[in-house]
Structures are given as structure tokens and as C-alpha cells.
Image (spheres, helix red, strand yellow):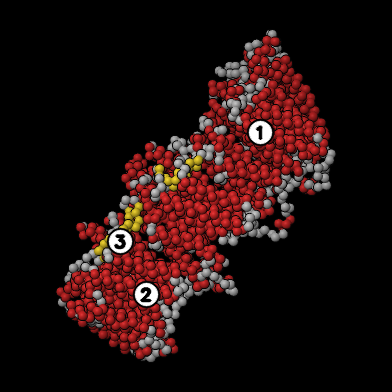
Amino acid sequence: MNPLELLAIILLTPLASAAIICLFLRRGGYWASAVSVVAAAVIMVLSFVFLLKWDGQTITGSLTWLQLGQDYSFDLGFLFNHEAATMLAVVAFVGFWIHVFSVGYMDDDRDKGRFFGGLSIFMFSMLGIVLADNLFMVFVFWELVGFSSYMLIAHYWDKDFAAAASKKAFIVNRIGDFGFLVGIAWAYHYYGTADISAITAIIKADPSKTVTGIGLCLMCGFIGKSAQFPLQVWLTDAMAGPTPVSALIHAATMVAAGIYFMVRVFFLLTPFALEWILWSGAIMTVFAGFCALGQNDIKKTLAYSTLAHLGYMATAIGLGFPGLAIMHMAMHACFKATLFLCSGSVIHACHHEQDMFKMGGLWKKMPVTFVAFFVATLSISAVPFTAGYYSKDTIIAGAWGKFAAGHGDAYAWAFGLTMLGALLTALYMGRMLFVVFFGKPNSEKASHAHESSPWMSVPLVVLGWIMSLGAGWFVYHWGWADGVMNALVPADVAQFMIDGYSHAAGGWEAAHHLFEESGAHWVEYLSWGCIIGGFLFTFFFYGRGPAQDRLQVKAPGLYHVFERHGWFDDIYDFYVSHIQRRIADFMAFIDTAVIGGLVVRGSGAVAGLVGMVSRSLHVGSIHGYVYWFIAGVLLFGAFALGLLR
Amino acid sequence: MTDFNSLLLILAIVIPLAAAVALLFGQKLCPCAAKFIAGIGFLAPAAIALWLWGNFGEAAKTAGYAYMSQYDLGMKDTLGISLYLGLNGISAPLFLLAGIVGLAAGWQAINAKAERLPQYLLLLLIMQAGLMGVFASIDIFFFYFFHELALIPTFIMIGIWGGAGRRSAAMEMTVYLTLGAMLSLLGLIYIYKASDWTGFDLIALREYVSAHSIADAVQHNIFGLLLFGFGILVSLFPFHSWAPRGYAAAPTANAMLHAGVLKKFGLYGLVQIAVPLLPVGALEWNPLLIWLALGNILFIGLVTIAQRDLKLMVGYSSVMHMGYIFLGIATLSVAGVGGAVILMFAHGLSVALMFVLSTAVYARTGTYDMRDMGGLGMKAPLLAGFFVAATMASVGLPGFANFWGEFTIFMALWKDHAWAVAPAVLGIIISAIYGLRAAAAIFMGAPSEAFQKASAGKAIGDITRAERIPAIILIIGLVLVGFWPHSISTSINEELMGDSVYQPKVLSTVQTPAAATPAAGHAHEESAS
Amino acid sequence: MSTVGLNAYLFVAGLLFALGFFGVLLRRNTLVIYMCMELMLNAVNLALVAFSRFNRTMDGNLFVFFIITVAAAEVAVGLAIIVALYRKRRTVQVEELNALSN
Amino acid sequence: MNHSELLTQLSEQYVSTNQWCALWPEIALALLAVLVLLIDLFAGRLRARAVPFAAIAGQVVIFAVLLGKLGTCDPADSGLLFSGMILPTTLSEVMRLFFLLASILVCWLGMLYLRKQDLPRMEFYCLTLIVTAALMLLGQSSNFVMLFVALETVTIGFYILVSYGRNSIFSLEGGLKYLVLGGTSTAILLFGIVLLYGAAGDPSLPVHSGDSLNFLALEQFLAANPNNVLAKVGMVLVLCGVCFKIGAVPFQIWIPDVYQGAPTPVTAFLAVSSKAAGFIVLINLVTGPFGPMASLTVPLLSAITVVTILFGNLTALGQRNVKRVMGLSGIAHAGYLLLGIVALIQGVELAAWAVIFYLFTYLFGSFTVFGVMSHLAGPDDENQEVDHYVNLARRQPFLAGVLAIGLGSLAGIPPLAGFIGKVFLFVVAFQANLYLLLGVAILGVVISIYYYFGWMREAFFQEQTWPEGKEEQLAPIKVCLPHKVAMAALAIITVLLGIYQGGFGGGF
Amino acid sequence: MHDFFFYLFSALTVLTALLVVLCPNAVNSAVFMIVSFVGTAALFLLLDAFFLAILQVLVYAGAVMVLFLFIIMLLDVERSSRVRPDVVTVVAASVAVLLLAFGMGYLFLTGHDATAATMAAVPQVPGGANPMEYATASRAFGYGLFTKYMLPFQVAGFLLLVAMVGVIVLSKRLTGSNEAGKPSAQEIRESEVSQS
């Protein structure tokens, strides 16, 4: 089969699934989930078949979708290269397992049709972003993932917070899309094409043709989608959606799409744009880490963690290691999905209780979940030889390497911030681990918790036990882990992550190499120290299974800052409910009072007034009327005599 | 000349009229007979439009027009007016739009349970006939004539079957739209004069213009007249005050047809008549047009955000979207104008859909005030689904036809007016804000107290078949074009490519005699931005 | 032989016309107003005859004949109306005849 | 001096042109009027039905014959008739039809009106017939004497008709006002004629004429002496008189009061026929004798046009009495028509047809409305408020529909005839480059929408605060079949003329 | 001689006309009106329009003014005609009329004057050169009326018919009320005005 056709089938399968569910299975809950899961399975199988057969060459192909005039055409096309391969693997693999998990998690939900339809639409849109070969098409699917995200966040739509969160997510994403779209238009007119490969060729031929503005505008899209500063506010609210959604969309794939896109158009980014990304990413790692410490909600904590790790990815891009960012994205997809799924499992077990301090002591009741969570915690904290270690630590090290290689002080700052971020990761993850799983149950619901069904636990095992632990390791030590890996992961997928970028001077190896050159091994030790120190501190500070947050007790002010997320939401809320609304009301006032009232109806009133005056001239007296005549005669006569001209 | 398909074209106008006449004389008929007659009156044009659309690609064309036929009604020799019908690449999709929306509106109306239903349907049928005529006319006088024919029932329908505040709304709308119509009429007659009394036949006029173009100053004047005349009819900022109030007061089927199809008259006039015949004028008025269109998008967008009344909001949003279309026309390029035409098509479907659904919401909540709603989605999930789809369509989500229009316009706009892109794109945020806010306020969250009180003891069902079918008709149109824009873009593209005005080269040569003014204006905006 | 020319007659006619107008404007009695209108017609007649004489054509004189005929008919009808109105309103004063007004 | 020689000369010069056959419709009308008198005298009990029947049927026959002969004989062949008193043209032929049609409709309205009144009946038809005959002559006259006599026949006829409702002080007062103001305007007109006569006959001037009351002679004189002050003043005074007839500012002031006071059919007669007569005279004047004075007439009439359109429309705003509305809107229509006249003076020949066409649309539109008004009017004829039309669409949907068509046509709404009429006028105005006037005209049209639709609004839109009991108090309105047919015919013609103009559009 | 008579009669005409306007009593006005008409007739004589002078005296001074006087007496309007016009009316009317008179004066006193020389003798009946030549004999009227002005003459007849019918319509008492017993709205509203 033609590879393009295969890709098209992969892309269209979820669309077909969504269409079937939307048209026929709106009320057929189980059938809908079956269709959706089968579609996800087909995607996964076909993707891996495709990847295994792929020879590593870039595949492109397109057809015209809309043509107007000679110079404007909107193409539908695929650009399949290394980052696409990685992303495809991640989306297909993680997506499938989360689908499976959802079957269990959504077991008692009455709107399964809507949920699984949404998941299918999401898969479709996400795959579209992965495969798109031009900016226009990226934008199309960009919007569509935004929509599916909106739809899934609003799954519990009878809840006010879900309604608000979905709205917020979509609108904030649109703000990002505003810049994105401007950037696309700019790029399109500047380069005369929206095709990514064509633009690549142009820039390769003439590197001076990069424009900071275009990069920054495109970055807006990334900022919105990947919830970077200052548009990060929507992601934590997005946790209002069902947990599998949080896992798939708001942790593993969609939010990473921003990173993926930045990697795709990496060649467009000027040093200035990169530095901007670097700073925003690095600061986000710390900021989100602190905020995570102030959350009681298990999912919100994870959401901040996601923000922080997106910050890491951004840092990697900012450092100039797009491959590394992709790799971290892949690793993050594994462990963060695991963490979310675990939290989903816990929440499901605790009858939708999300407050960590009402849980506790769950490790005995839910061993599978616990193990998965534990492994993922290690991974996210970048404990050596777990998945996170290979990517995250390399980012920190890469930052140092850049600084050491004399590229500027900004890299030192980036290093410092990311390192602090690593410490914070250990802190909030440790806090979570100890609070949720150790000690004694703190509530009725937690005490009745029990392990979830196989639908949920199997994905936990696959994603958590195996992938979180092994992904990076397999990747890195590919050469001698052949036997194990072959059974689980297609060889090439892992390989791309390494050598797909090594030659691009922006991959994992490049970063690692740079770091090795600097010879600063203390960095490694420091990061280990951070991890160990962080865990120890949390172990002692929070204790096992506490009923309340000790930080909140000891330092309420600080905790409040963390909890309120630096009052970002409040500022935005203030803007929306006061400033924007006042402006809108004022405009509406102008519209109704001035334009509609004063001008339009005012002129009507003036006409009416003049009419009243002229009407009052009809006094009814003959005399009054004869005056008109004599006036008329005089005027006419004067006119004839030339007195009026 | 008059072959079968040409006959069909005129039948698309005559059948609704005949149905209207039948209803007029058959007022004593039983309601089902009236419904049946009206049903034929709506179904026939839609079917004909689809058929003609399907055959458009293969049809024999003269000067880009297919299915031509001409009838002299007495003014051909003196005023050069004749009933001259045909479809070209731009009018054909809009003709189709008129057919589709007409069918949807007709269906809605037939099931509307309106008081004095036969009269209601009668007026709607007249409107439908006018709409079919507008886009089928080659003669620009009849183009105008049919528009007015379709406009008149609006006033009456608003007055009789309208909602709150209809008396003043109908009056304001009538007076205001008459002003617009009169200005555009003057403009059209002016064209007749400026072209040495060639007549009102668009084909001949184009030939005339290509042979000897109209003097620049005259072009300037005519285009100004047409711009403001059409602008009022299309609710160009700041001439829009009639629209939201009018739509809010209008009965649903009427609002669907008016906002969906009739309003496209002015835009269509600009694309087909004003710009091709008066390229220099278009160029000179362009800067102002862009500013006004941005006013539509930004100012009206913000006003829309402030609306609490669902129907007013839909009305305002429809005004806002006109801004995009004006921008598309202002690009004066194939892409931009093509995008504008696509958006005209798409907006026609989506706004009609919004009106259907708003009415469906009203039927359940008993109010249009969004603050008194909430949580309707739990009781009417399908309605909610439709509504969200409609919102997303009007917000410009890919997969719906609107996206193509908006996106293409943004892309085309950059070429000559890069500064205007950013403010224009701001509109996508604004429309997302009000669209989603409405969806959330109506369908999501917990029911408001007022709604709980109002709906206490009432069974609120999901969308009924009468409401569903128009909605489905419209959504199918939106999605089909959304997924396969070629379906309408091909003919538009061909037509526009044949139009020398929209070609970049020709414009620049045309520009030279009057280059000073537009160039200066342009430079001014560049610095202003 | 006289030195009085056409213009002298015309001036007299004009003066009569103006006086007639003055009366129409000034008087409140409908009958007198009506008489003043006859005065205006009379002025016209005078001018017409003068022109006719000085232009040496008969048409002016013949026109006067028609004007007198019409004036007589008008007077008859007008007086009938005034009388009928007087029967209803018991007045012929202009200021009291303003039932029709805004 | 040989008297027989003189007589021979006279008969050769003047009597040989007296072709009475050319005036057969006028003569037939006059005879019909006499017949009506005779019927009234002798028919006894039958007369209540016989008189209107005879009047209408007779006119219809004349109308049919005239219509049949239209275009078969070229009036230009006959040339000057009655020693230059009469100059039939295609235009005047058409206007004959116009006046006949209007007269038939007035008689029809008269039947409706007189049914509700305690008034003498027969004389109404007799007067209408004679006035119509005079109107027809007026349209053809090409001599000021003829013009004056015909005009006075019309005017005196109208004095009587306006005061016809003699039981009503309003009718009589309207008659008196029309009498005084009409008399004044007659005097002004006469003074103007005299000055023209004097100037054109002055032997000391070039191209003076021995027949200086004749239009042709006058035209030649004015062409040769464009700066003669007497002639200029005479001309504007004549225009004053004509402006009184057509109701142009500042000679429009009588209109609302007189229209309100006059019986409804007479109001219609005044609004349509009298105004049309003014316009046909104006057309004859500006294309004939005043043609050379375009430099004076164009600015003067342009200014009048502007003021007339604005005054008529603005004053009609907020007017509640429908007869006054019709009057004031009639002023506005006169303004639109003046637009055509100005274009005509500028040399746009089509303009005459535009004016005629507009007059026809105005006729159909007006009579449609007046027909409805006559049905709704109570015995107190002058008291017809817009408020009486509330809920008409429910009480009598047929009348409401007809009213809507009539008002729509007057407002100039497609697809009704009035719209085409306006388009026609606009086109000719464009041909004459009258941009300012066009601007004012559309402003006027826009304003007019307000009161026309305000009226329609009362008829159609249900009053939300309509008290429950009030509806029953209103007597049901009955429309007999013949009246229904008549009104439906008017409405249908109004619609058809908007869609298909046929010969109307092309100058016959 | 001619001049003297002109000044005399024109002064008489104008002054009596002024008195017509100014006389508060309608009867007096009517009487002065008759004098004014006679003065005009005299001016006609000066202009060699003998037939018209006679006609003027007969029809105007004789018939019309007598009719006026008759009606004035009949209506007995002395009561209200005593009311003097208010100042505003006087001023406004005077200003308007002065403007008018000024215009007339401007028109007639500044224009070219056909001098007395053109007042040359006129024949009794028209000569052969111009059948409508000015002539003093009343026969000349006949020539005009029955040849050139035949049609207006006939129409004038109908005009008189109209006037006659009109006066009858306006004045005759209806014998059999068509819809008797139905009080009209006017009657109710005008109940304060007593019927004659």
C-alpha cells in the first residue's frame, strides 16, 4: 500500500469513528466506546506497521483543498519525517491505552457517546497536526484539537465549573491562535508559500530570510496551546474534564502539540525568538512547580506539573535542541499519562474525590495503581535510568553545556531555573506520593477504595510500569536492550529519538555531547541531590497521609500565593468581568445610544420636529395662507427680475 | 436560447410566486392544503437550484453565464431594462444558498404554528421568489427589483408576527433600508448613465467598461453611492443599527431568509457589479471600506459581547461577520473576493441555523435573556449539540464552511493591507468569546433560578423533528463545504479568474491614472498602522 | 394728443392689483375679501385692455370678455358658498372659519 | 372696409380649422352631462340608480372607444385646431384617457360617498363630467384664452365639488378656502398672462405677434426676446398659477385643509386630476412657450422641487388625518413630478413620458387608497384618522391588502407601479444631471416611508394594548362585490404595471 | 384732455379701491367698489374699449356688485365687521403689499414705454390686413368671438352651466331626505350652532 494512503487511512479512521458515533451511536454508550477503542487500536496497529516499514526518508504528498486565483491555494498534505514519526508513535500508543482506560473510567457515565466521539475527534485532529505539511493545515487541526479539548472539558456540562473551564480553554487558545494566524499570514506572504518543506528549503538556501516577528507570531500559537506564560491559565481549569481527557489531551499529546509545532518550524526561529522561548520555558518550570505545591486537588497538582514540564520542553527548544524537546515530550507523555491515569484510578476508586488530603493509605488498597504512580513519580523526577532522566536531565545539562560553551548568561539562568524546577518536581511529586498513598485513609471514600478494573489497570501497567520506567532507558541503551525492546516497542520509533536529531545538531546527542564537553559532572550530582533531597524533605515535612497541608498551616501566606497561582487567574478574571465587560457595555451603550439613538433615531426625530413646525404653519386661517401666496409671488417675481441670483 | 434549464431557472422564481398567489386565493383552504402548496413553493426552488448547480459545470456558457433567458417587459427600448436571467460562477452558489436556506426557512415556517399561517407562508414565498430572482438576474435593475420584492415581506412579517418591540423595529428597519435601497438604486442608474445608456444588462455593461472605461471621478461617485447604499443594506458599520433590532423582532423564518440570504445582496452587488464596473472607484474607496469593516469586526464584536439577549446577540454577530466579507471584497483579489463569496455562502447557512436554534431555545425557555437560562443541555442534548455546532461554525472552526471564508480573507488581506490583518484576526477571539459564552449560558452549568422557576412542572423535550430538519439541512451544507470547499470554490474561482479587475496586473495598470489618491491613502495607513 | 402712455395704465392696474391683494390680506369679512379679489381681476382687465389698445390687437379685449364672464360665474358660486357657510356658522369672519387646521 | 371680405377672411383663417370631430370625447362628455341632467329630471324613481350608472357606463364607453382609437390616427396630422386654441398631441391623447379614467373612478367613489350622505346626488356626476371634459380641453389647449376658460371651468367646478358636502361646515369651509385661494391664484395667473400678452404683442419688439396669446407665437417671441422683463415676470406669474394647481411650494398651503374638507371622492379628484391637469399644462408650457426661457425656469423649478419634496414629506410626518396625509404626500409627489419637468426642460424628451407614467401610477395608487378610505369613512367624512385603521387587517383583510398595495405603490415600493414610476423619473433626472434634486428626492422617499408605513402599520400590526371590548364597538365593514372587484382591479393593475409596463414604458 | 381724464379716473379708481379695502363697513366697501368699477369703465373708454366699458358697468357694477350688496344685506354682517384688524395684520399686510406695489412700480415705471404716439387712432372695424386688429365697434367682438374664439365661447357656456348647477346644488333644499331620521355626525357636533 502506498505510504500516503496508509497515512490517510490512519488519519481518517478516527474521523470515521467520530462520524459513526455522532450519527448513529449518540445513545449507544457501549457501542460508542467499542467503536472508538477499535478505531484507536486500528490507529495504533497501522501506525506501528507503518513505522516499522518506514525507511527513514521524508515522505510528502499533497492535494489541493481550496484554490482561489493563481497565488492562493490551500493544500491538504502530509509531511512525514522524524519528529512526525515520534509524535505519531506517541499519539497512537498513548492514545490507544488511554482509550482503553476510558472504557473503565467512564463505565458509569451516561454520556459515553459524546465522550468517545470527542476522543475520536481529538485523535483525528491530533493526527492531523502530526502529519500536516503546511502551516494552513496545521492551523486547521490546531483549531480542531482546540474544539475537541473544549468539548471534552465540557463533558460534565451540568457543572458550572466545567462550563467555565471549557469556555476559558477555548478562548485562551484562541488568543494564542490570534498571533498564530497573523504569523501564518505573514509567513505565507513573506515566503510565498505555507508549505513547511518549501519554507525550509528557502531558509536553507538563504538563512537570512528568517524573521523574528514571524517566529514570535507563530510562537503565540504554541504559547496558547502549550499553556505557556502568559496563557497558562486555562490548563489547570481544564482539569474539569474527565481524567482520561486530562491524561491524553492536557498532559500527553495536545499540549505537547505546541512543542511539536515549534520543533517543526524550528528553522524559522531566530536567536531572539529562541531566547524568548528559553526564558519563558525556564521560568515556567519554577513558577508552575511552586504553584503545584499549593494545590490540594490531585489533578491540579498534576496540571501544574504538566505546565512545568512543558516549560522544560520549551527550554529545550530555547536552548536550540528541538530533538531533545521532542524526546522529553515523548517521555513526558508516558509518565504524565501514567500519573494522570493513576490519579484517575484513584479518583474513580474514591468516588470522584479529588482532594489529596482526603485520601491517604491507598497503596495497600490499590497496589497496581500505586506501583505505576510510584514508577512515574521517579520518572518525572528524573531519577537516573527512568524515562524522565534521559530527557529532563539532559535539558538541564544541556543548559549548562550551552553556558559553559560560552553562549551567554541566559543559559546559566536557564540552568539554574531548570535545576530549581527539578527540585520542585521532587518536592511536589513526593508530597503527592506520600499524601495520597501512605498513611491512613483520611475519609470515608478513601477507606472504601479498591483496585480498579482491568480496563484501567492494564493501561497503568503498560504505560506506567513499562514505559515510564523503560522508555528512555530503552532508547538510550538501545544497542544492548534489543531483546526486550523488540517485544514491546518497534525498534525504529525509539531510534528516531536518538539519531533523528543527532545529525540535526539539535537532538539529544548534541545536547549530551555539549554537556560532556563542559565536563561539569557536578551538575549530575547536583540534580541527583535535588531529587533525593526533595523526596526526603517531603517525607519529613508532610509526613505520611496527612489530613491537611503542613505548608498551609506553617506558612499560610506562602501557600496562598502558590494556591492562587500568583493571582494570575484573578487578574484575568478581573479583566474579563470588569475591564472587558465594561468596555463591551460601553461600546454597546455607544451603539444603542449614540449610533442607534442619537444619530439614527435622532435624525428621525429632527425630521419629525421639522414636520411639526411645518405642520403648524397650517393655521387654518385664510389670511395666513394668502401670505404664502404673496410671498410666493414676490419670490417668483424677484427671481424673474434677477434679484435672487 | 431558452432551453429546459433556462426554463427551470425562471420557474425557480415563478413557482414560489405561483404558490403565493395560490395561497392568496385559497385562504379558506384547510391548513394542510396551504402547507402542501407552500411546501411545493419552497421545495421546487431548492430542487431546481440543486439541479442547476449540479449541471453548472457542464452547462454551455456565454460570457460566463449559463441558463440564460431574456424577456422584455416593456422597458427595454426606453430604459434598457429587461428580465434577463442566468447564473454565473458567483451567482450560482448564492442561488443555491437561496434555495437551501429557503427550504430550511420554509420548513421551519410550515411547522411554526404561526397565527394566520397561510398569510405567513404567502409572504415568505414572495420573499423566496425574490431571493431566487436576485441571484438569477443578469439585469442589474431586476437584481435590485427582486431584492426589494424580497425585502417588503420582511417589514410586514416583522410587524405582524414579530416579537417584542416589533413596531418600532419594523419601522426603523423599513426607513433605514429604504434609504440604503434608494442610494443603491441611484448608484445603479448612475451606472446606466455613466455607460452611455448601455442599459442595465450586466454583460453588456462589462463589455462597455472593458472597451471604454468610465471616467475616474464618476467612478468615484458611483462607487461611493453603491458602497453606502449596499453598505446600509448589508449593515456596514456604522449603518447597522437596524439589523440587530430588526432580527431580534423578526419571526424566525423571516430572519433566516433575511440575514441568511437577502443581506448578501449588497455584497453580491459589490462583487459582481460595483467592483468590476468601477475598479478605480473601488480602489479609491478601499481604505475607508477597510476601516469601516474593521469597525464591524471590532466595535460590533465588542457590542456583541455585551448582549444578554440571545436573538440580539445573533443579530449583532451577523453584523460583525459582515466585516470579514467586506474586508474580503476590499482586497480586490481573486483570493479575497473568493473568500468573501465563500463566507457569504457559509454565513448564510450558519446564521440561518443560529436563528432556527435560537427559536428552538426560546420554545423551551420562554425567554431570550441568556441570564435566565442555563442547563438546558441536560434536557435537550441534541439541541445543545446543534447549537454548539452552529456556534462553532460561526466562530469559524475548520470543518465548517465559514472557516474557508474567514481564513482565505485573512490570507488575502495581508497582500495589500497587512496592517489590517491583526485587528481583523482579533475578531476570531471576540466571536469565540460571545459564541461560547452563549453556549455555556444556555446549555451548560446549573439551570438559573429564573429558568428553574419557569420550567417547573413543564416537560422540556429535545429538539423536535420540525426544528431538526431545517437545522440538519443547513448543517449538511456547512459541513459539506467545510470538508470539500472545492464544491463551491471551483466555479467562483473560474468566474473571478475571468474577471480582469481582480487580477493583480490589471489593477495596477488601471490604478495609474488615479494613482495619486489611493497611493497616498495607502501610504497614510501604512504609517498609521 | 396725450402724453399718457401704456405704462401709466399698467401702473394703475398694478396698483389696483396690489390694493386688491392688500384687501385680501387685511380684511376679515369674507365678503369683502371676495370683493377685493374682484378688484384684482378688475386690475387685470385694465391692464389687458391697455395692452390690447397699445398693441393694437383685439385678443385682449376678447379676453376681457371671457374674464368678466368667468368672474360673474365665480361670484355666483362664491356667494353661494359663503351663504351656505353662513347658514351653518352664522358668521363670515375669517378668523372664525378655522375648523380645518392643525 | 368690406364686411363680407373680412368675414370670408375670418372664416378662411379661423373657422376652417374648427374641426369639432377632433373633440368628440369632450363633446360626448358634455352631452353625457346633459343626459344625466335629463335623466334626473325624467327618470323619477329610477334615478338613484340610473344616474351613476349612466355616468359611469357612458364614460366607460367613451374610454373604450378612445382607447381603441389610441395610436390609430396620428394627432400630429391634424395640427392646430380651432384657430390655434387646441393642439392635440400624443401626450394629450393619453391624458384624455387619464382624465376619463380618473373621472370614472371619481364617479365610483362618489357612489360610495353619496350613499352615506344626505345630499343631492345627480349634480355630482354632472359636474364631474363637465369638469372632466374641461380637463381634457385644458390638456390640449395651446392658447391662453382657451387655457384660462378651460381652467376656470375646472376650477369653478371644483369650488362646487369641494363644498359639495354642504351639510358639513368642513366641506363648506374647505370650499371657501379653495375659493379664496383659487381666486387669488387665478388673478395672479391672469396677471401673468396679461404681461405675456402685452410683451409679446408689443409692436416695437422683434418677432412680436398679432396673436400673442398663442403658445407658438409666444415661443417664437420669447426665443427672440429672452431678456424681456415683462415677459419674464409674466412667465413666473403664470408658473405661480400652475404651481397652485399642482400644489408646489409656496402655493401648496391650501392643500391639507381643502383636501380634508372636501368629500373624499372630490379629494381624490383634486389629488389626481387637478394635479395631473397642472402637470400637463406645465409640460405644454415648458416644452412650448417657455421653452426658450430654460435658463430661468430650470433654477426656479429646481428650487421649488427641492422645497416641495421636503415640505410635503416632512409635513406629512406625524399627520394623523389620512386625508391630510394624502394631501401632503400629494405635495411630495408633485415634487417628484417636478423633477421630471425640470429634466424635460433640460431637453430630456423621455421625461414627459416619465411624468405621464408617474401620473398613471399615482392615479392607480391614489384611487386604491381612496377606495379604501371611502369604505372606512363614516358620515363625518372629514374625520378620517389613521387610528380608524387600527386592526383593519383583522376586520377586513381584503381592504387592508388593497390599502397596502396602494400605499406601497405611492411610497414607491417594488414590485408596484409607483416604484417603476420613480425609477423612470430618476432615470430622466440622471439624463439631465440633476444630482442634487435626486438626492433630495431619495431623502423624500425615505421620509415618506415613515408615514406611509405608519399608516400601514396601524392597519396591519396588532396593537398590543388593544382593549378587548373596543373591537366589538366598531361596525363591521361591508364591501359589496362590485366595489370589491373595482378595488381588486386597481390593486392588480398597480401590481401588474410594476412588473410589466408594456407600451407604458416606451411612450406608447 | 385725455391726460386729465386719465388722471382723474385713475385717481378715482385707485382711491375708491383703497376705500374699499379700508372701509370698516362692508356695505360702504361695496358702494366704493361700484365707484371703482365705474372709474375703470371710464378708463376703458379712454382706451377706446367702448363695448367693454359698457359691459363693465352692466355686469360688474350692475349685476355683480348688486349681488354683493344683496348678500351683505341678507347676511347682516354688521355685527362682526366692526372688529378692527389687529396691528400685526395691518403691518404684515402693508409690508407685503408695499413690496408688491414696489415691484409693480419697478416693473412698469422703469420699463420701456410705448409712447402716446402709439395711441394712434384705431378703426371701427378691423381692416383686412389683420382681422384681429383693434377696433372700436362692438361688431369686432362678434367677429372674434364667433370665429377665432368659438371654442372658448362654447366652453364658457358650459362654465355658466357649471356655475348654475353649482349654485343650485349649494342652495337648494332637499325635498325628500335620502336617509331621513339618521342624524349625521356633523349635526351632533354642530348642535351649538343653531340652524337657520
Q: Secondary structure at mark 3?
A: strand
Q: Judge from the rendering whether residue B147 lies leftward or rightward of residue E187; answer left or right.
A: left
**Quarter the N terminus of chain C occupies:** top right
Asked if D159 appears above or below A300 in the picture, the reply is above
In this view, the residue in front, B268 or B381, is B381
Mark in the foreground, 2 or 3: 2
Name the amino acid, label 3: Gly
Residue visible at 63% across and 57% down in the picture: B30
Q: Residue B35 at what x, y percent from top left?
A: 58, 57
Name the amino acid, label 2: Val
Q: Judge from the rendering whether residue A384 lies leftward or rightward of residue A575; answer left or right.
A: left
Q: Quadrant of residue D335?
A: top right
Q: Chain of mark 1?
A: D
Residue visible at 47% across and 75% down in the picture: A159
Count the labels in the image.
3
In this view, the residue in front, D236 or E172, is E172
Q: Which residue is tagged 3?
A: A77
Q: Quadrant of residue B164?
A: bottom right
In this view, the residue in front, E33 or E139, is E139
Q: Residue A632 at what x, y percent from top left?
A: 62, 34
Q: Judge from the rendering whether residue B324 lies leftward or rightward of residue D144; answer left or right.
A: left
Q: Which residue is tagged 2?
A: A37
Q: Which mark is residue D63?
A: 1
Residue visible at 42% across and 89% down in the picture: A448
Q: Chain of mark 2?
A: A
Do circles 2 and 1 both sit on a common chain? no
Name the amino acid, label 1: Phe
What distance separates the C-alpha of mark 2 from that of mark 3? 26 Å
Q: Secondary structure at mark 2?
A: helix
